[in-house]
């Protein structure tokens, strides 16, 4: 900073001696701290879903690589899209997110041109009612950068794609079909023109699709196929029948011959096939049978077959597994993916389990045709890549979590709770998204606050580790293993977030206590996992419903075919409903087909939704997976079935969610999913009279997509008539109670939206997806108020949502839209209840959405900026950190934050005055108290008042030091300019000494070195005030802080003492200015 001309034109002794008025004005103007950057990067203010977690891991259903290239792979997630790496799996990019489906069943590259990539959608591993269909086959001609849907939209699930090795326009697709009803669009399809047209090449019958396909590497006209007859409904997975068989073509699919010589007799189930690349006469068929064997082999190209293995572990849970491949250089080396990864070296006669990694609950295998030591295996926890023939694997995980539900608690910030398929239960703070290090687009994700430092790194295991899981999330603020398991619900107690309830398959209910880090099993009864739904007292689904009463947090509800309630932590349960299902005996059957599979995924005739009302005590809604809707108004004493009043609703749907209104006890919204009844239309109904009449409100949703069925609905508790809906591949909102719906997909991939919740005080939307984890749409005030925006407005400023007073992460946002970029900086002034401006924020505006962020603090203190050369370090300006600069800061390790932190406001209502292009917009903001803070309003007021006193003292001290530094810097410069003029030099040095004496009352010589770890002498007034600001304000470094409490008596005493020292130094400063410093001429 250079003194202005008026202040510098004077005689030698005084020409550069700034008088008190000039010095003070320069100091205050120059060193008042600028507000931290309050504007956002371009585009960041557009409403957008933000990925929250979990960190990584999930089911990879398909994989493909480039032959001879150990750096490039494509991974197809079961319901999480296509991911690509080109650096040997160090980093991945999601390359399929622009498409309207995320379920991937097959991937294939053209070996003649690896830029051509095919993706078959719909997961072919079918063992759950939650497995996801697709919408056909996609093609990329630029290595995954862009994709085009090439048809076969109704084929449901594609499990294999084979591209001709020489002509990439010839492609075969192995399509299972939807498997939810008879259809023609299943079997093997072929294109000769790169996907422009398709012919159905192999068709067994309308109940059977293709499950395996392999091509002869020496003759691409020879293919062998496995077909699978399978049927899926809410009450059964029926695998096997006369349609399951092995077929072969020798004319490129023009004709097919059913192979039988030595193969097992019908009925059989799922089949996969493989032709050995090194010896095409060697053909393998992995076949699900009840008792006839597991693996068959032909040594004459499919003419005759013999069973070579009876190992049941090769075909266990066939719907979920059954994959076989052969080493390209050795026809005797066979790999089988099942619950473990199996390898045979003797042509399939004996197998060993590869325990060195690769996969667990394995699904797909890709073997490099150019390198027999190089292969990839995928499974529930990601995929493993080996380049040394399976001796070691590089384990890869991706952020593709299949989340069943999501809930939030009442903490500040609120925490998110969920449970992930193939892992378990978890929770984490809403302002601390996880970091995914191998996905650059997620690795840089940051929250809207700092999270809770005291929780960072927690996540130790408590109780059992969760069934069906891989383990924890890692050293993040997120905590795993809250009881429960991979399926079901995870619900926090809204009064005590240390208590978490979870439900799980196997009739398991747990209650987890954060204080002990342990979960207790508190189920209402015993249930064997292998049990068919008959002959047991309670039928409990894979995802059994769980709910906590909003009027009594000690009352918890749990559903099987009846609803249970406990009010003593699960110590005992009472039955509060009859069997709410239709109890149709034809749908109470063992699942699995030719081999039983009873884990509860296909239990029919069960309660699937429980929803207590927050508007009326004792009002509980319930729905079943056979289409029944009930309610009770007396906590279960009497139940009323209102299903028959839902006009136009087909039978046997799954009532996925019931949303009682937040405004009217008689109003509720019901979602019914019929996709397992082969009906994929959206169904949302609304009642306003306790179910006496219903109105279908989903006609405005798209209905022509295979994933159009609705899975979740939520009402905005802040705006009546604003609804949110999640379908099998999209998210929608309505501002008119379902008359019209608007899609919203910014930041949200097209994975199934399984659950939606809206934290009332935060105006956020939190969603769980089955395939891409958890997301938050933060601050939906723009959407809530969008119908108030006039088309002729140049600027629209929205009413802000409430903000919570927080010691470390307080944040208020003021949103506005501008048709054109403002011509001048936008100014926001925050006024207290007395009309005094306590904070001014300026930020550049731009055309489109904008936000101004206020940290809920008063203006910060002024900062010291040293300009002179310290007496003990004449070479300081030569140091790289200061070279070319005019000022240096005061720094000290551990308390830097307290140096720039302003006082925190008290809870209350504040006025906001926003000036944009000369136009003034007035809004009000409610600052709420964090409910976890026990201090009284008076205590917080006293805390803020003391913080203001400290801030003002820091500013006063900094202003004096800065004024002195400006003058001493001019003396320093003058001494250099007038060297040799003894009289003038003597006078200047005398003035400098006197000014320095005053300065050293406020800052020490050590502080002048600007070294944060230079522990030489005691703090002086300014540094002690910084430390005290950390003590009374929100802390700094090792100083814990105390902003949420009344200041201690010791802190008050310290401030009184420091103010006395400051007053004495101020008096000396004024005396020096009056007596020793000449006034400018």
Image (cartoon, rainbow, N blue to C red):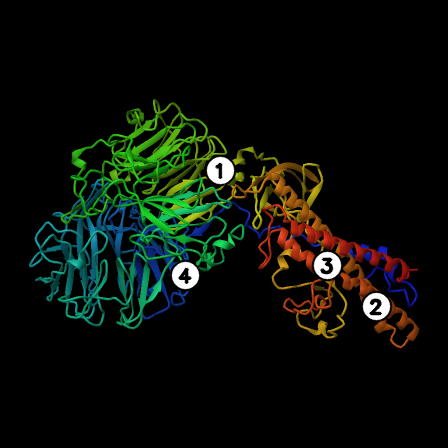
Name the residue beneath numbered marker 1.
Answer: 760
- Return the disc, 1 or 3, that comes first in the chain's sequence: 1
Q: Position of residue 29 (x, y in %)?
A: 77, 54
Q: Is residue 867 left or right of residue 601?
A: right
Q: Position of residue 50 (x, y in %)?
A: 47, 49
Name the residue beneath numbered marker 4.
Answer: 92
Q: Nearer the viewer, mark 3 or mark 2?
A: 3
- Return the disc, 4 or 3, that comes first in the chain's sequence: 4
Q: Nearer the viewer, mark 4 or mark 3?
A: 3
Q: Quadrant of residue 86?
A: bottom left
Q: Is residue 2 left or right of residue 800?
A: right
Q: Nearer the viewer, mark 4 or mark 1?
A: 1
Residue at x 60% of width, y 54% of height? 1035
- CA separation, marks 1 and 2? 62 Å
**Foreground of the two, 805 or 78:** 805
Residue 291 appears anywhere in the view: yes
**Foreground of the two, 755 or 991:** 991
- CA separation, marks 1 and 3? 46 Å
Name the residue beneath numbered marker 2.
Answer: 993
Q: Is residue 165 left or right of residue 925?
A: left
Asked if the residues shown at circle 4 and circle 2 are in contact, with their CB atoms under 8 angstroms apart, the answer is no
Residue 672 appears anywhere in the view: no
Q: Position of residue 80 (x, y in %)?
A: 36, 52
Q: Quadrant of residue 335?
A: bottom left
Which mark is drawn over residue 1021? 3
Which quadrant holds the C terminus? bottom right
Asked if the residues shown at circle 1 and circle 3 are in contact, with their CB atoms under 8 angstroms apart, the answer is no
């Amino acid at each position: 900073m250079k003194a202005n001309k008026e202040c510098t034109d004077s005689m030698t002794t005084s020409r550069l001696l700034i008088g008190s008025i000039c010095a003070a004005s320069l100091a205050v103007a120059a060193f008042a701290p600028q507000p931290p950057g309050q504007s956002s990067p371009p585009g960041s203010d557009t409403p957008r879903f933000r990925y929250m977690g979990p960190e990584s891991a999930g089911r990879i259903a398909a994989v493909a690589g480039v032959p001879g290239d150990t750096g490039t792979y494509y991974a197809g997630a079961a319901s999480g899209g296509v991911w690509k790496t080109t650096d040997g799996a160090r980093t991945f990019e999601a390359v399929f997110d622009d498409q309207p489906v995320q379920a991937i069943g097959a991937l294939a590259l053209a070996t003649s041109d690896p830029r051509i990539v095919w993706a078959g959608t719909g997961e072919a591993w079918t063992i759950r009612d939650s497995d996801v269909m697709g919408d056909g086959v996609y093609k990329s001609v630029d290595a995954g950068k862009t994709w085009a849907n090439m048809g076969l939209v109704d084929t449901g699930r594609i499990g294999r794609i084979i591209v001709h090795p020489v002509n990439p326009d010839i492609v075969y697709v192995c399509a299972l079909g939807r498997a939810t009803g008879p259809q023609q669009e299943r079997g093997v399809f072929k294109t000769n023109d790169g996907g422009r047209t398709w012919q159905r090449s192999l068709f067994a019958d309308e109940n059977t699709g293709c499950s395996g396909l392999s091509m002869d590497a020496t003759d691409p006209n020879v293919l062998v196929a496995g077909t699978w007859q399978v049927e899926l409904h809410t009450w059964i997975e029926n695998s096997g029948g006369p349609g399951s068989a092995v077929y072969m073509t020798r004319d490129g699919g023009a004709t097919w011959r059913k192979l039988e010589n030595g193969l097992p007799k019908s009925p059989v189930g799922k089949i996969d096939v493989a032709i050995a690349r090194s010896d095409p006469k060697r053909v393998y068929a992995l076949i699900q049978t009840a008792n006839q064997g597991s693996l068959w082999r032909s040594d004459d190209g499919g003419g005759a077959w013999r069973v070579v293995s009876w190992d049941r572990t090769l075909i266990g849970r066939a719907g979920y597994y059954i994959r076989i491949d052969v080493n390209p250089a050795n026809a005797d080396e066979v790999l089988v993916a099942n619950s473990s990864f199996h390898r045979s070296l003797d042509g399939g006669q004996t197998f060993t389990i590869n325990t060195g990694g690769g996969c667990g609950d394995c699904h797909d295998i890709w073997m490099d045709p150019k390198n027999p030591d190089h292969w990839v295996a995928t499974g529930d926890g990601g995929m493993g890549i080996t380049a040394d023939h399976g001796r070691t694997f590089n384990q890869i995980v991706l952020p593709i979590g299949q989340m069943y539900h999501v809930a939030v608690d009442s903490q500040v910030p609120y925490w998110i709770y969920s449970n992930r398929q193939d892992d378990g239960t978890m929770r984490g703070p809403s302002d601390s998204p996880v970091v995914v290090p191998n996905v650059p687009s997620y690795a840089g994700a940051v929250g809207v606050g700092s999270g809770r430092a005291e929780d960072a790194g927690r996540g130790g295991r408590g109780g059992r580790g969760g069934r069906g899981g891989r383990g924890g999330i890692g050293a993040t603020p997120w905590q795993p293993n809250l009881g429960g398991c991979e399926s079901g619900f995870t619900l926090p107690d809204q009064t005590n977030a240390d208590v978490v309830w979870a439900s799980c398959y196997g009739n398991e209910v747990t209650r987890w206590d954060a204080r002990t880090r342990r979960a207790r099993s508190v189920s209402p009864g015993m249930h064997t996992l292998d049990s068919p739904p008959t002959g047991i007292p309670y039928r409990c689904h894979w995802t059994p419903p769980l709910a906590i009463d909003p009027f009594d947090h000690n009352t918890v509800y749990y559903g099987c075919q009846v609803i249970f309630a406990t009010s003593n932590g699960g110590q005992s349960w009472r039955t509060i409903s009859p069997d709410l299902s239709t109890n149709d005996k034809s749908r109470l059957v063992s699942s699995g087909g030719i081999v039983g599979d009873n884990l509860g995924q296909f239990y029919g005739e069960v309660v699937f939704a429980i929803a207590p009302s927050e508007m009326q005590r004792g009002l509980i809604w319930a729905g079943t997976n056979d289409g029944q809707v009930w309610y009770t108004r007396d906590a279960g004493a009497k139940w009323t079935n209102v299903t028959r009043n839902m006009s136009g609703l087909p039978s046997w749907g799954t009532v996925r969610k019931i949303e009682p209104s937040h405004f009217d006890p008689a109003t509720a919204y019901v979602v019914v999913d019929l996709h397992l009844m082969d009906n994929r239309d959206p169904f949302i109904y609304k009642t306003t009279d306790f179910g006496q009449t219903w109105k279908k409100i989903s006609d405005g949703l798209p209905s022509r997509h295979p994933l159009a069925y609705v899975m979740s609905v939520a009402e905005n508790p802040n705006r009546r008539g604003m609804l949110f809906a999640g379908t099998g591949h999209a998210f929608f909102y309505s501002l008119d109670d379902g008359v019209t719906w608007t899609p919203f997909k910014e930041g949200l991939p097209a994975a199934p939206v399984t659950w939606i919740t809206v934290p009332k005080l935060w105006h956020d939307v939190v969603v769980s997806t089955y395939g891409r984890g958890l997301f938050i749409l933060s601050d939906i005030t723009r959407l809530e108020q969008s119908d108030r925006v006039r088309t002729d407005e140049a600027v629209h400023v929205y009413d802000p949502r409430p903000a919570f007073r927080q010691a470390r992460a307080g944040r208020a946002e003021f949103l506005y839209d501008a048709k054109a970029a403002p011509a001048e900086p936008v100014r926001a002034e925050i006024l207290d209840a007395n009309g005094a401006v306590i904070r001014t924020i300026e930020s550049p505006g731009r055309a489109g959405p904008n936000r101004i962020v206020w940290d809920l603090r008063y203006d910060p203190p002024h900062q010291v900026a040293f300009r002179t050369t310290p007496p003990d370090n004449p070479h300081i300006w030569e140091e790289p950190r200061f070279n070319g600069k005019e000022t240096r800061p005061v720094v000290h390790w551990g308390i830097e934050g307290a140096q720039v932190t302003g006082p925190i406001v008290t809870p209350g209502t504040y006025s906001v005055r926003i000036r944009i292009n000369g136009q003034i917009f007035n809004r009000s903001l409610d600052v709420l108290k964090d409910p976890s803070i026990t201090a009284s309003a008076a205590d917080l007021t006293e805390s803020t008042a003391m913080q203001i006193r400290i801030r003002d003292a820091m500013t006063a001290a900094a202003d004096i030091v800065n004024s002195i530094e400006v003058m001493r810097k001019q003396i320093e410069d003058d001494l250099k300019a007038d060297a040799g003029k003894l009289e003038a030099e003597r006078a200047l040095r005398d003035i400098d000494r006197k000014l320095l004496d005053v300065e050293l009352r406020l800052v020490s010589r050590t502080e002048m070195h600007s070294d944060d770890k230079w522990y030489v002498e005691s703090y002086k007034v300014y540094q002690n005030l910084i430390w005290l600001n950390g003590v009374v304000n929100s802390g700094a470094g090792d100083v814990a802080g105390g902003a949420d409490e009344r200041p201690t008596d010791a802190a008050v005493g310290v401030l009184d003492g420091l103010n006395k020292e400051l007053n004495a130094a101020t008096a000396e400063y004024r005396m020096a200015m009056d007596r020793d410093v000449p006034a400018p001429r």
